[in-house]
Amino acid sequence: MTNPKPTPRTAPTWRIPAGMLALLAALGVYAGLVARWVAPLIQNWPALGQTPVYVVLGVVWLLPLRRFLIWMETGRWG
């Protein structure tokens, strides 16, 4: 069984501006947590050791983003 083609949104929805504000707030909190807890742990590591840690932490926040963007557009989490 295939999914029906979604119909385009014709009216503005509160989820998009609220979702953008929530996303910015969540990213700020995430960055603050990384700066507060991770940075002091690895500050004495060489730069080549810190780089993979920050690359992984810079990509991890993308994992829940797909479902969040779907919710912003459709109002459903899946």
Image (cartoon, rainbow, N blue to C red):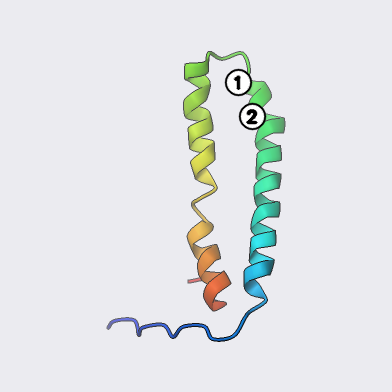
Amino acid bearing label 2:
Val
Vertical placement of 39 versus 72: above or below?
above
The answer to whether 59 appears left or right of 15 in the picture is: left
Q: Residue at x 62, y 70 (%)?
A: 16
Q: Which residue is mark 1?
A: 42
Looking at the image, how many numbered discs can be counted on the residues?
2
Q: Residue at x 47, y 28 (%)?
A: 52
Q: Position of residue 5 (x, y in %)?
A: 36, 83
How packed mark 1 is, by other alpha carbons closer than 10 Å (few <14, some 14-19, many 20 or more), is some
How packed mark 2 is, by other alpha carbons closer than 10 Å (few <14, some 14-19, many 20 or more), is some
Mark 2 and mark 1: span between their CA atoms? 7 Å
Please tell me in which quadrant of the rendered image residue 57 appears.
top right
**Mark 2 residue element:** helix
Q: Which residue is mark 2?
A: 38
Picture quarter with the N terminus? bottom left
Q: Position of residue 30 (x, y in %)?
A: 66, 44
Vertical placement of 20 versus 29: above or below?
below
CB within 8 Å, label 2 to label 1: yes
Amino acid bearing label 1:
Ile
Identify the residue at the far left of this view: 1
**Mark 1 residue element:** helix
